[in-house]
Structures are given as C-alpha cells and as structure tokens.
Amino acid sequence: MKRRTFLKAATGGAAALCVPAAQARGNLEPAPEAVGMLFDSTLCVGCKACVAKCKEVNSMAPVPAADGEDIWDAALDLSGDTLNVIKVYRDGNAETKDAVENGFCFEKRSCMHCVDPGCVSVCPVTAMRRDPLTGIVTHDPDACIGCRNCMVGCPYNVPQFEYDKAFGQITKCQMCNQAGLERINKGGMTGCAEACPTGATLFGSREALLAEAKRRLSLKPGDTYSYPMGDVRNPDSFHEKAVPQYQQHVWGEKEGGGTNVLHISAVPFDRLGMPPLGERSAASVVETVQHTLYSYLALPAVALAGLTLAVRRNTRDDHNDEGGE
C-alpha cells in the first residue's frame, strides 16, 4: 500500500468535515413583528390583579393557602397551576418601596419569551415553538411527549410539569396566544397587561417597549411622568407617578440573546433572582457544541472512507502494473 496516498485521502476528508463544524451558530434575531411586555417593578403594588386575570383567561383554579386561610390565590411560585406570579424582595426592615437597603419591591415571574429560546432548541418533537412573525413561544400539548427537556433548557425555570395529574402536561405562559385563545392574533393584549391598574405590566411591540424602557431610564428622578397603561402603542390611560432612581439597565435587551419580555427596576436584578447570563444565547452555544461533536464523531467513518479509497487505488495500480508486465 502507498502510505502517501492513504494519508492524503484520509487527511483531506477529515479536513473537509472540520471546516463547517468550526462555524459557530450566532444568536437568533428578534422576530420581524416581535411583541412582548415590559414589567416595571417600581410601578407594581403587589395587588396580584395580573395573577387573577391570568387564571381567568387560562381557566386555572386558584392555589389555596398552606394554612387553609381563605385567600383567592396564594401561589408562591410558578407551577403546573400558575403561569404568572408576583414575588417580593425584602431587605432589612423593608420600610421603603424600591430601596435596595431596608426596602422592598415586587417582581413578576412568567415566561420571558426569549428571542433565541432554549426550550425550543432542546425540544425533540417541536412541542415548543417560536412564532416566526411575533416571536411568541408556545407549547403544543398534542405534540409533547413529556420528556421535560424544556424545563432543563430554560434559564428562568419557567416551564412547569403537572406532577399532580395522571396525564400531566407542561405548562407555561403563552402570552395569551395559544391555540383556542389567540388574543394577540385577534388584535388584543395579554390578560395581565389588560388587568394591571398601574401599568406595571405593559403590552406592545418589542421595539416600542424597549424604547419606552430606555425613555424611563433617562428621566430625572423625582419628576412626574405619565406612565402608559395597556398597550404602549395605543395606551388605554396613564398613571402619573414620581420617577424613581432606576437601575440603568433593561433586563432582556441582550441577556441570553434577548427576550421579548423586558424588565426594569430600582433594585439590582441579581437581588431579584434573575440568573447570571451573558449576551450569547444558551441555545446557540449548545447547538454549536452538538453539531461540532456530531461532526467529530463522524471522523472515524471519514478515515475509513479514506482508507478504502487508498486500498482501491493501490489495488488498481497493482493490477495495472501486472498487466503491463
């Protein structure tokens, strides 16, 4: 066998395979008509009107209090029965609203509708889907096989499984646009934005919401500002309030590749339990690693193909030499 021929064939095939494997997938871009919500923690008063409306829209029963006290809904976190919840930040004596020290504030938890969603990336049966036009991330229970990969793939711990049901399903906020509801496609808004009495949850296009968030961050603390309520593009009304000392950061503009649900606050987001995320989406990182790994696993096959080719050429050359003699 001609060693040079074999090495040339095998090395050439391996190099050809490695070129596409080395190309990393970047973050997905926001959908062309992306819609979402802006949650302003400084406007939230903890009334849970958004929680009640979410339960109503999605036909979900309230979560009773642990001590049996007659409270309409006492959900403390997201679950198979709760798609939207208000949590409380407290520090020290918790006397001052929106103060980092000795203060308190409210934070909303629901699906962030990521621009490049990890739950969609890891779902093996496309039960999790990102709408190519609006960017809304929905779940198809008919396609779901209950593997719960989406629960692992979400950095916000949003998808939840109905463990208390014999045939449980994954549940999550679908921005009131799941099959059979589709408020957004019909020109409506999310139930939580519709019910919020202070405009803490605001609906609209991602572009308009991001502009509104940055506008608020540029305002002078102490000045009065008319906060739009309902849909930021066509507000139902306004809520006047003194401007707080905002953190100069819009959560979701870039975190994890960006989200369609944006948050602003006077309290640092790490205090509010937001995960530490870089600008690159986890989906782009994982898919790049997977594709590279799968490509490298194919290298032995490529080497074998090169060896086979070399053997065939060498055999052919031997036959030709014998024929010439």
Image (cartoon, rainbow, N blue to C red):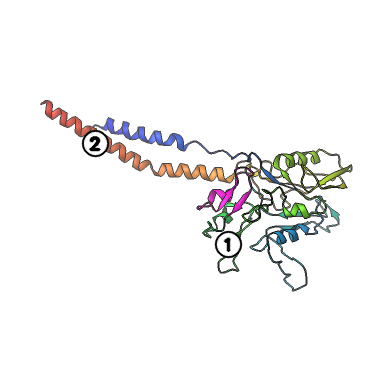
Residue 169's label in the rendered image is 1
Label 2's element? helix
Mark 2 vs mark 1: give the one in front: 1
Name the residue: 51% across, 42% down.
288
Q: Quadrant of the N terminus?
A: top left
Specify the farthest residue to the bottom.
Answer: 68
- Residue 204, given in percent of the width and then of the height, sits at 73, 44
Across and down, in percent, residue 97 comes to 84, 53
127 within the magenta span? yes
Q: Residues within 10 Å of mark 1 (few under 14, many from 20)?
A: many
Q: Is residue 306 left or right of residue 139?
A: left
Per the model, the C-alpha gap separating discs 2 and 1 is 55 Å
Q: How busy is the neighbourhood of tag 2: few (under 14 within 10 Å), some, or many (20 plus)?
A: some
| Quadrant in the picture for residue 102 | bottom right
Residue 311, numbered circle:
2
Instruction: Tell me if 151 is positioned left or right of 59 in this view.
Output: left
First to last magenta residue range: 115-139
Q: Residue 305 placed where, x, y %?
A: 31, 39
Q: Nearer the viewer, residue 114 or 282?
A: 114
Q: Where 14 sits versus 251, above or below?
A: above
Residue type at the position of mark 1: Gln
Up/down of 179 relative to 242, above or below: below
Question: Going 60% across and 46% down the picture, which residue do you hit?
Answer: 131
